[in-house]
Amino acid sequence: MKTRYFLPLLALVPLALASSATKPEPAPAPDANLSKIKLPAGFTISYFAKGVKSARELAVGPDGTVYVGTKDDKVYALPDRNKDGRADEIITVATGLNAPNGVAVRNGALYVGEINRIIRFDNIAARLRQKPKPVVVYGKLPTKEWHGFRYISFGPDGKLYVPVGAPCNTCLPEEPIYATINRMNADGSGLETYAYGVRNTVGFDWSPQDKALWFTDNGRDQLGDNLPPDELNRAAGPGQHFGFPYFFAGDIADPEFGKGKSADTYVKPARKLGPHVAALGMKFYTGKQFPAQYRNQIFIPEHGSWNRSNKIGYRITLVRLDATGKQATSYETFASGWLQGQTPWGRPVCLLNLPDGSLLVSDDQNDAVYRISYKG
């Protein structure tokens, strides 16, 4: 006869709670890794949350709760109720999703971009612990995983912007939706292509000055260590073509597909970035905490190279614009130190302006969200 053991009912309660919410891992003081980060004088970096597995795109709700998409299968919420610059807990909002990289908040609803679809969790702030069932907003995105992470955001026109990367290193895509940035109404209707010839953007934002769309784009591989540069692009309006697969960085012809094509046919980048740095979730800084010279300038997390003889990237760069906000005038390092020699301990992915003027940074290698603030 087998002996059977029964757990008291109360013993199961903590297990149930732990499945949906966990306390962030405590940050050591001083932190051995964060002490390696170099920033301009007056700036500091700290952990907003640790233990956020595969953290990718960030969004903030009206109540200040930060939502985190991942390249795993989960979406997290990070409330900071006491406004101390550190998440109170890590709440698993949803699980079992298909690489829910993209997150955006609109009218109290959390939109999530999976590889194959856009879904929505209504009234999310009141349902964080309930694992709510999502509404499918748009369910016909391509299913190929190569360049399949969706970065999503609502534009000044109220439409949801969704890129579809090329399903290859370089190719003539078999379907017109590949290598594009698209937009749709908030209910998923009215899908249209906004920009063409975009190999793989996992980061875009709109100028606070003229509302033009700016986006990063990753160059192709297998042209050597130093070709081509990644790109920072400005789309003045719908319908422009940015070169893929014919040209990279405006003037580098693809050995196969660039033959017989003219570079002047396509929009050139606003700024050439480093080669293979994997420039991702850029943001205009719109807060008031940083010094005035940083306002309305572009910060770019560079995820870091995987295919160079010597690694580069693994940092946050700053692109300064002229007074019109239309011309890039410089490209410089803002935060570095995630790469030590040739060994990275972290990979910055996306940025988020918080209402207090600080800047959040996600890291899908160190499973963290950092907070950069200015103390003066």
Image: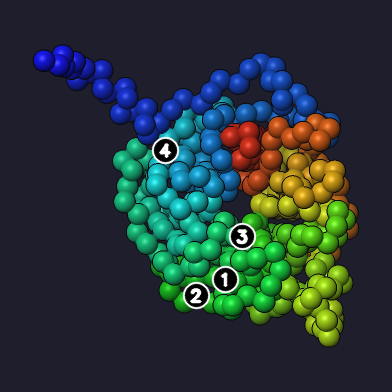
* Colour scheme of the rendered structure: rainbow
Observer-side mark, 1 or 3, equals 3
Inter-mark Cα distance, 3 to 4: 25 Å
Tag 2: residue type? Leu
Residue situated in front as seen by the camera: 326 or 223: 223
Q: Is residue 25 left or right of residue 336?
A: left
Give coordinates of residue 173: x percent, y percent.
63, 75
Observer-side mark, 3 or 4, equals 3
Residue displayed at 60% across by 72% down: 178
Question: Residue 310 lies in what quarter of the image?
Answer: top right
Give coordinates of residue 353: x percent, y percent.
63, 45
Q: Which residue is mark 2?
A: 191
Could you say which disc has been placed on residue 92 in the image? 4
SS label for mark 2: loop
SS label for mark 4: strand
Of pointers 1 and 4, the one earlier in the residue sequence: 4
Observer-side mark, 2 or 3, equals 3
Tag 1 and tag 3, C-beta contact below 8 Å: no
Inter-mark Cα distance, 4 to 2: 30 Å
257 up-or-down from 143: above or below: below
Tag 3 and tag 4, C-beta contact below 8 Å: no
Q: Residue furthest bottom?
A: 260
Of pointers 2 and 3, the one earlier in the residue sequence: 3
Query: 10 Å neighbourhood of mark 1: few (<14), some, or many (≥20)?
Result: many
Inter-mark Cα distance, 1 to 3: 15 Å
Tag 3: residue type? His
Question: Residue 365 lies in what quarter of the image?
Answer: top right
Could you say which disc has been placed on residue 182 in the image? 1
